[in-house]
């Protein structure tokens, strides 16, 4: 596994570490359980992480020094790739290892995979996780725009790797539309969810354990990194509209954002969180929108369980693992129909969909569930049912089939 810029050991919910880290960690563990030996190569971002960490049976994370031992702008990381590639090769030689398959994640690691394939001849399975062209399509400022270099590398990778996995049929279609990719080389394999960790639990007990207000207080939970793409501003504006239309809810409603930094650490808030805090204050939402700060994956099940609704109002998600975790936790999910969530959430069955950047529509969908306990119960049951398709054992099995195909030189068949 190659994941240069982001380690599966990273603290989740910060600026850079999120779905991709969880994906690589959980997929690797699943492959380990299936008897594969997996080494995850990543760039060391601090001086304290040991160079080799055993993640699970058969799975190691190898952190290699290449460039500064600190977080680094991913667009500038390209300068350090030759060093990184050499270190991977040296490591393999020193342990006398021969890898059968290279599985690269994100455009930067795709470059590493190509160099290693040249040296070793092993086939490449690549996953983009996000596409630069899609990010540019929804970017609202130059800061959010991805470089032309990234787009060019993504286009090259689509032509040169042995197989690509897309998280959803739409993800695959976007590779075809925006990059002219050959759809036959792209297999749709969604991300997974840990169905044991994330399962329906008692709401009252979860709230008591977290010190959150008991029912009938209403709680809407959003789990995610705090960045403009996540559309957290839409949730804040929707909350204002919900409360304006339902004065009785005032003082009995909280939108809880899990990710970023907590309320008492404003000095560490990034620009987006400061912007969101100012919006909340300007709308007079005081206690109705609360930033909980990032939580570990182990802590999250209680947050989902505490929720009446889990929401993902993103402008763009190639997948949206937090939406899937909400479903697995048996909570109705209200998500935007921008990308992955439209594939994960079946509108009216396991949750409700809403267009991105449309707070009035989001408020409408949240309100429908908050006003109608029967609908909430129906969606909650449908949510868990939907999540069952995405257990890691199923996903691991599908990925191993791609490995077999590239090893035997077969073009992966197109499956949706
Ligand atoms: N996450 C977490 N703690 C946090 C915030 C997020 O563990 O405080 C996890 C979340 O559970 C999910 C992942 O980070 O597994 C986010 O993935 P998603 O696909 O929702 O968003 P991405 O980070 O890929 O944009």
Image (cartoon, rainbow, N blue to C red):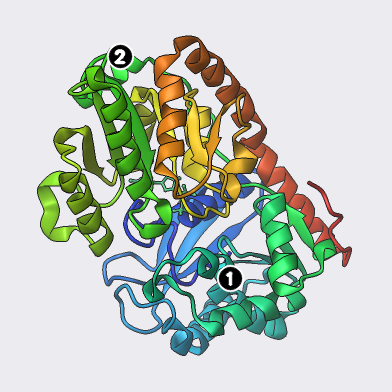
Left or right position of 282 against 194: left
Q: Is residue 289 above or below residue 40?
A: above
Q: Nearer the viewer, residue 260 or 98?
A: 260
The residue drawn where x is 55% and y is 20% is: 379
SS of the residue at dot 1?
helix
Left or right position of 43 against 381: left
Q: Position of residue 58 (x, y in %)?
A: 56, 52
Does the residue tagged 1 have its C-beta within 8 Å of any atom of ligand 1?
no
> In what quadrant of the picture does the N terminus appear?
bottom right
Q: Nearer the viewer, residue 45 or 159?
A: 159
Q: Position of residue 386 (x, y in %)?
A: 63, 28
Separation (CA) of disc 1 from disc 2: 43 Å
Residue 377 visible to the viewer: yes
Sequence-wise first label, 1 or 2: 1
The residue drawn where x is 40% and y is 42% is: 359
Q: Position of residue 35 (x, y in %)?
A: 66, 47
Left or right position of 325 against 104: left
Residue beneath disc 2: 204
Q: Is residue 406 above or below residue 314?
A: below
**Tag 1: Cα neighbours inside 10 Å, few (<14), some, or many (≥20)?**
many
């Amino acid at each position: 596994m190659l994941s240069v810029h982001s380690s599966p050991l990273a603290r989740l919910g910060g600026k850079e570490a999120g779905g991709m880290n969880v994906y690589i960690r959980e997929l690797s563990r699943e492959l380990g359980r299936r008897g594969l030996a997996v080494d995850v190569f990543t760039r060391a971002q601090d001086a304290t992480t040991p160079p080799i960490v055993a993640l699970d049976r058969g799975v190691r994370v190898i952190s290699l020094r290449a460039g500064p031992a600190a977080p680094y702008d991913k667009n500038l990381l390209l300068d350090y790739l030759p060093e990184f590639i050499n270190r991977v090769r040296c490591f393999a030689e020193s342990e006398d290892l021969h890898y059968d398959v290279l599985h690269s994640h994100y455009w930067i690691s795709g470059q590493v995979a190509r160099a290693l394939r040249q040296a070793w001849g092993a086939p490449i399975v690549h996953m983009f996780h996000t596409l630069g062209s899609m990010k540019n399509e929804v970017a609202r400022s130059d800061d959010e725009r991805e470089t032309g270099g990234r787009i060019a590398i993504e286009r090259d990778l689509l032509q040169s790797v042995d197989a690509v996995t897309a998280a959803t049929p739409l993800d695959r279609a976007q590779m075809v539309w925006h990059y002219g990719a050959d759809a036959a080389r792209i297999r749709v394999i969604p991300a997974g969810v840990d169905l044991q960790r994330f399962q329906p639990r008692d709401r009252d007990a979860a709230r008591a354990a977290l010190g959150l207000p008991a029912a009938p207080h209403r709680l809407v939970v959003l789990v995610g990194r705090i960045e403009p793409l996540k559309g957290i501003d839409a949730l804040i504006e929707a909350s204002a509209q919900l409360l304006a239309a339902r004065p009785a809810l005032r003082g009995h409603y909280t939108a809880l954002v899990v990710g970023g930094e907590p309320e008492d650490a404003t000095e560490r808030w990034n620009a987006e969180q400061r912007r969101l805090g100012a919006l909340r204050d300007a709308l007079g939402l005081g206690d109705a929108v609360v930033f909980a700060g990032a939580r570990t994956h182990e802590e999250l099940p209680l947050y989902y369980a505490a929720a009446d609704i889990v929401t993902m109002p993103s402008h763009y998600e190639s997948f949206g693992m937090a939406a899937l975790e909400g479903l697995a936790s048996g909570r109705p999910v209200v998500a935007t129909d921008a990308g992955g969530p439209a594939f994960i959430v079946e509108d009216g069955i396991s949750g409700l969909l809403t267009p991105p950047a449309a707070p009035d529509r989001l408020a409408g969908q949240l309100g429908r569930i908050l006003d109608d306990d029967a609908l909430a119960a129906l969606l909650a049951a449908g949510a868990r049912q939907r999540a069952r398709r995405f257990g890691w054992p199923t996903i691991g099995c599908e990925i191993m089939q791609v490995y077999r195909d590239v090893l035997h030189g077969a073009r992966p068949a197109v499956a949706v």
